[in-house]
């Protein structure tokens, strides 16, 4: 099942997305033409008055590396995409530039006076690698608004609602006593205790919510009194006080009592060492946490109603419908979600590639120039990043190709790369037909 097709009229006003079969009929009858290849959009050749505009919901699941994007018509999931960011590439490029600059200054300058008083970041500054996530997400939100009649936007704002954890009555006792509250608590504890048993450090086993001070001894349901324990440890502790249960393990007792009062935070890995999988997950959570309000404020500039949800609520909705965990299905379950009718199983995979770099000199690992790039990105009507189809009549790579991304060279033979991976090869520009102009992204299914 493919994504529905976007349709705009001759005045570029968005109409209801249509089924691919209907889109093929419009193209075959000559009533429409292809406006954009990615996302696939048709433009009608005359103005029409639609009988009814079906308002769609745009839902987002922001992630550190990948953001899920879906469109819903009531309870029908008609379009899905996964947007892969390039924040890590930006971070690596900036670190490389910094090391080259420092090395050059050390070689060229005997002494450099310190400059700290004239360097001030503006209010609300975030790192370029984090800002990129907000900008690329907003780029696609604006594109979809131009292609589809969207009624409102829903975005996952936080992993768990800490206000509801500490004061569940903030929205009434019904929320406190419902099943969703347990999902909020469990999701928070899984992150805080690194998905391990607090007593025996067991991993990849069923974990239960454990009261440090048992309720039978006056313990509360606050998260400061909760931890995670495997089934054997939970049964062994029973309703005993933790000090009695760990009387022969004072170091472990002290560690648990300190951690239970500490807030959830990311601990950096020591210099020169790689992050563990748990620390990587926390680092990703910190990256999302740093940009979530920036994205929320940016979404409000679209003048559309913006609703929010939590990670625990998303997990609850997805689990209730027995759906697998993917970025686009998580996005579909953000916020208040009815029973979904999924009409597509083939999300558009979007990867941010950028628009190239201005650096003319290619350097080695020590920062010394080894070759130079050409000044021009255009050649024979093509540009680096264009998506083309090729009809190569002879040679080793003879055949028909579709959806190849090109890289311009000084000669008329360009480098072609399949978007879904594969071996790169060369082809003459006379065998190429441009189907999608470079826009900083690559696409695949």
Image (cartoon, helix red, strand yellow):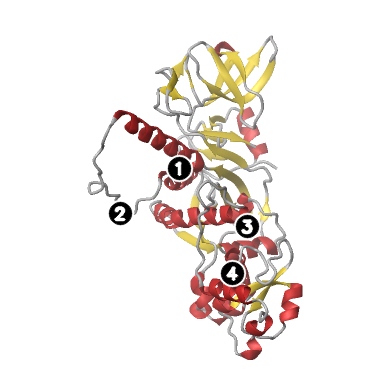
Q: Looking at the image, can residue 57 be seen?
A: no
Sequence-earlier tag: 4 or 2? 2
Asked if residue 141 lies left or right of residue 349, the reply is left
| Residue 28 to residue 328: above or below | above
Q: Which of marks 4 and 2 is in front?
A: 2
Dot 4: element: helix
Front label number (2 vs 3): 2
Residue at the spot of label 3: 75
- How many marks overall? 4
Around disc 2, counting alpha carbons within 10 Å, would you say few (fewer than 14), some (14 to 19), or many (20 or more)? Answer: few
Q: Examine the image and state in which quarter residue 104 appears.
A: top left
Q: Which quarter of the figure is the N terminus placed in?
A: top right
Image quadrant where residue 38 sits = top right
Question: What's the CA distance linking mark 2 and mark 3?
Answer: 41 Å
Q: Earlier in the sequence, mark 3 or mark 4?
A: 3
Q: Which of the numbered marks, if any, corresponds to residue 123? A: 2
Vertical order, 176 against 276 (above or below) = below
Placement of 169 over or under 301, stated as above or below:
below
List the residue tagged with mark 4: 184
């Amino acid at each position: 099942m493919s994504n529905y097709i976007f349709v705009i009229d001759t005045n570029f006003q968005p109409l209801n997305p249509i089924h691919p079969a209907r889109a093929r009929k419009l193209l075959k009858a000559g009533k429409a033409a292809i406006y954009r290849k990615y996302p696939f959009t048709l433009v009608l050749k005359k103005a029409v008055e639609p009988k009814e505009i079906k308002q769609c919901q745009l839902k987002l699941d922001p992630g550190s590396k990948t953001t899920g994007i879906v469109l819903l018509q009531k309870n029908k999931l008609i379009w899905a995409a996964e947007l892969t960011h390039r924040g890590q590439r930006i971070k690596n490029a900036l670190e490389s530039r910094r090391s080259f600059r420092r090395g050059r200054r050390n070689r060229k300058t005997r002494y450099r006076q310190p400059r700290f008083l004239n360097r001030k970041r503006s209010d609300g500054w975030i790192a370029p690698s984090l800002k990129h996530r907000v900008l690329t997400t907003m780029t696609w939100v604006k594109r979809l608004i131009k292609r589809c009649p969207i009624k409102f936007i829903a975005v996952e704002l936080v992993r768990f609602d800490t206000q509801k954890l500490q004061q569940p009555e903030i929205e009434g006792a019904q929320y406190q006593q419902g099943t969703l509250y347990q999902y909020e608590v469990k999701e928070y504890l899984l992150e805080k205790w690194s998905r391990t048993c607090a007593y025996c450090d067991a991993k990849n086993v069923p974990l239960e919510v454990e009261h440090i001070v048992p309720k039978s001894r006056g313990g509360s349901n606050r998260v400061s009194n909760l931890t995670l324990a495997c089934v054997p440890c939970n049964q062994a502790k029973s309703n005993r006080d933790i000090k009695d249960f760990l009387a022969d393990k004072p170091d472990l007792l002290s560690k648990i009592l300190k951690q239970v009062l500490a807030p959830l935070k990311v601990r950096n890995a020591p210099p020169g060492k790689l992050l563990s999988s748990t620390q990587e997950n926390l680092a990703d959570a910190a990256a999302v946490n740093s940009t979530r309000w920036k994205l929320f404020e940016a979404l409000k500039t679209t003048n559309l109603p913006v609703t929010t949800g939590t990670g625990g609520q998303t997990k609850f909705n997805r689990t209730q419908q027995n759906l697998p965990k993917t970025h686009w299905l998580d996005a579909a379950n953000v916020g208040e979600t009815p029973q979904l009718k999924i009409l597509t199983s083939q999300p558009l995979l979007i990867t941010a590639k950028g628009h190239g770099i201005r650096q003319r000199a290619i350097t080695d690992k020590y920062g010394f120039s080894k070759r130079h790039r050409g000044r021009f990105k255009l050649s024979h009507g093509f540009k680096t990043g264009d998506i083309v189809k090729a009809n190569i009549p002879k040679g080793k790579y003879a055949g028909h190709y579709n959806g190849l991304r090109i890289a311009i060279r000084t000669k008329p033979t360009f480098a072609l790369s399949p978007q879904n991976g594969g071996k790169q090869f060369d082809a003459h520009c006379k065998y190429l037909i441009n189907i999608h102009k470079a826009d900083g992204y690559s696409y695949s299914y």
